[in-house]
Image: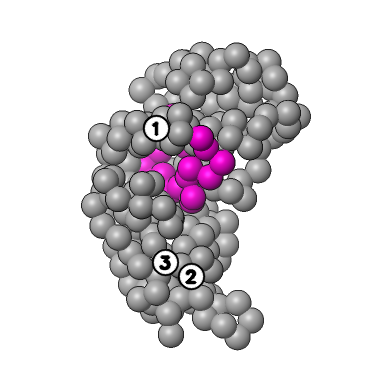
């Protein structure tokens, strides 16, 4: 998916978070959104996902050079963020089964394959609300990595992950980058993006 930002801006009250952001994210490429805490990385990711609206400017989404209407963009996107809510009353299996009733699994991975991949197979019938923070993060990332999507958005992707979880994230990110998906990572941690992203967008460059 190609995403073209045209003079995009976001303001909270009287403060501009960023302004006049004109940039194109090209199909199949990987990008890091960088900048200090509070610089607007997560805000931009939320706007790209449709979770929030920009204050001004325009976003054009294209899949196979065909413009995607704004109200259909969600079906092309996978996202994993700290503010993403899981269905905590479901078991792990129920959560994955419910999700993939609406979205296609990447490369026909089975639900069992996905649980095994993210080291959660022993928690198949465990209620999600009883997961640790690291387990919940692996589930969020698994939903993003294993859903067939044109655009994958990751915000602080290794939050709450231990060394095994970080290694798993990096391995699955490498696999994802071999697909045609456009990947955008908002991060302050170089190990989350430095060896994986082809370009960096520093939000500070668009603050006025």
Q: Residues within 10 Å of mark 2 (few under 14, many from 20)?
A: some
The reply to whether residue 99 is in sight is yes
Tag 2 near tag 3, CB within 8 Å: yes
For this orientation, the residue located farthest to the right is 89
User: Nearer the observer, disc 1 or disc 2?
Assistant: 1
What is the x, y in percent for residue 16?
52, 81
Residue on which disc 2 sits: 39
Residue on which disc 1 sits: 167
Q: Establish if 98 lies above or below 77.
A: above
Q: Residue at x 46, y 34 (%)?
A: 163
Given residues 33 and 10, the one toward you in this image is 33
What is the x, y in percent for residue 54?
52, 70
Query: Label 1 to label 2, Cα distance in Å?
Result: 27 Å
Q: Establish if 15 lies above or below 82.
A: below
Residue on which disc 3 sits: 35
Q: Establish if 115 lies above or below 41.
A: above
Query: Label 2 to label 3, Cα distance in Å?
Result: 6 Å
Q: Residue at x 52, y 37 (%)?
A: 161
Residue range (magenta): 144-162
Q: Earlier in the sequence, mark 1 or mark 2?
A: 2
Q: Establish if 117 lies above or below 138.
A: above
Residue 36 lies in magenta, yes or no? no
Q: Residues within 10 Å of mark 1 (few under 14, many from 20)?
A: few
Q: Residue at x 51, y 60 (%)?
A: 42
Given residues 79 and 132, the one toward you in this image is 132
């Amino acid at each position: 998916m190609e995403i073209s930002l045209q003079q995009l801006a976001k303001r909270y009250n009287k403060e501009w978070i960023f302004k006049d952001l004109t940039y194109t994210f090209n199909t199949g490429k990987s990008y890091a959104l960088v900048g200090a805490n509070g610089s607007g990385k997560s805000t931009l990711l939320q706007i790209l996902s449709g979770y929030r609206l920009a204050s001004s400017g325009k976003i054009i989404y294209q899949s196979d050079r065909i413009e995607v209407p704004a109200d259909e963009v969600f079906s092309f996107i996978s996202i994993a963020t700290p503010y993403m809510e899981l269905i905590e009353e479901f078991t792990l299996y129920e959560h994955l089964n419910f999700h993939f009733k609406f979205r296609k699994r990447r490369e026909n991975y089975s639900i069992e394959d996905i649980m095994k991949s993210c080291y959660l197979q022993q928690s198949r019938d465990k209620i999600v609300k009883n997961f640790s923070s690291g387990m919940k993060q692996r589930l969020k990332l698994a939903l993003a990595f294993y859903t067939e999507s044109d655009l994958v958005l990751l915000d602080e992707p290794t939050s709450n992950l231990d060394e095994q979880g970080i290694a798993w994230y990096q391995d699955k990110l490498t696999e994802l980058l071999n697909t045609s998906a456009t990947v955008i990572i908002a991060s302050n941690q170089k190990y989350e993006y430095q060896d994986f992203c082809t370009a960096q967008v520093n939000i500070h460059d668009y603050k006025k």
